[in-house]
Amino acid sequence: MVRLGFGDRVMQVVIYILLALLAFVTFYPFWNGLVISLNSGSDTALGGVTFWPRDFTLENYEIVFQDKRLLNGFGISVARTVIGTISSILVTSIFAYGMTKRELIGRKYYMVMCIITMYFGGGLIPTFMLVRSLGLMDSFWVFIIPSLVSVWNMIIFRTFFQGLPNGLEESAKIDGAGNWGIYFRIILPLSGPVIATLSLFTAVAHWNEWFLPSIYITKEELLPIQTILRQILNSNIMSEQMSQLDSSSAAALSRMQSVTTKSLSMATMIVATLPIIMVYPFVQKHFVKGVLVGSLKE
């Protein structure tokens, strides 16, 4: 065992303290949002609610889960994330596999054109006109089709595929396998770490996207939960909730008196954030390996 000197121990303590402070600064806003969502809104308005609920209640979540708009938005977000991630990873990896073929005519020019799109975009208005001309306005597929191919992910996939032994494909071709057979039976099974990593990135991007639906979607039943949450933060949801409740129900009115826009917003934020956070532990073991393999191999 290597014994650390006094200076090394001091530096180690300083590093641990800095990491602890960084972890606290990163985690505390989420924790405070959770605390506020579990605290009475009227009590939160008085201030001083920091680490623990002072007046514990689940009324905020009861109202959130009673709102059909939020439940529908949650379903849209889940469907968009699952379908969008699977389709994007599949199409992008197929594209990347094709770009590894030396016999592909014009491969270098295709690569240059792909890289150009990373630096120069058409802009919001041309993109809007394109989406409208394709008939994707007010369609669920506007979440999927425009984001099918990610050039950045394609480059990572391509770099990873180029690092695989050439003998694998050569032996498969000798056995009579074609390109599709090689891709699905050999390449994909060996690409677990990079697929898991890029799937997480893609899923987070789909789940957190709120801006584009506000442009392309006018039907309320197609809005994802993040866009709905944005609308809640920018409007007074209390009047909407009050109109939805039966005015003859004294219990309902009493409950609404202890709920505020901030408490409902925090409860909605927690509901919208937890699912994507729960995905991370399942891909954590592949995360570092996938990023390093995809970025370092040449």
Image: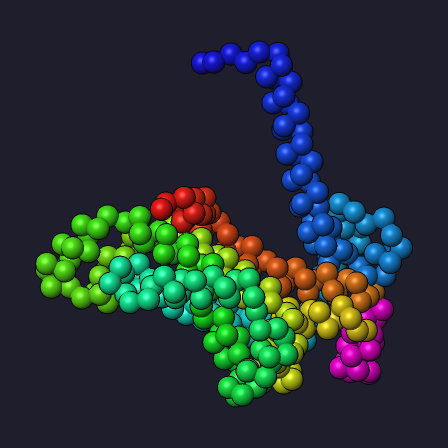
With respect to residue 27, does 140 lie above or below? below
Residue 101 percent coordinates (x, y): 27, 60
Where are the magenta residues, as a range?
Answer: 237-257
Residue found at the very far left of the displayed protein: 175
Is residue 249 shown in magenta?
Answer: yes
Nearer to the camera, 199 or 71: 199
Is residue 171 shown in magenta?
Answer: no
Q: On the rendered structure, is 148 left or right of 56?
A: left
Nearer to the camera, 282 or 43: 282
Residue 64 percent coordinates (x, y): 69, 69
Nearer to the camera, 235 or 240: 235
Q: Residue at x 75, y 65 (%)?
A: 264
Q: Which residue is drawn at 56% across and 55% down?
A: 277
Q: Residue at x 16, y 55 (%)?
A: 170
With respect to residue 207, does 277 lie above or below? above
Instruction: Say which quarter of the image contains residue 293.
Output: top left
Residue 9 percent coordinates (x, y): 60, 17
Total labels drawn: 0
With respect to residue 105, does 217 lie above or below? below
Nearer to the camera, 290 or 157: 157
Q: Which residue is drawn at 24% across and 57% down?
A: 186
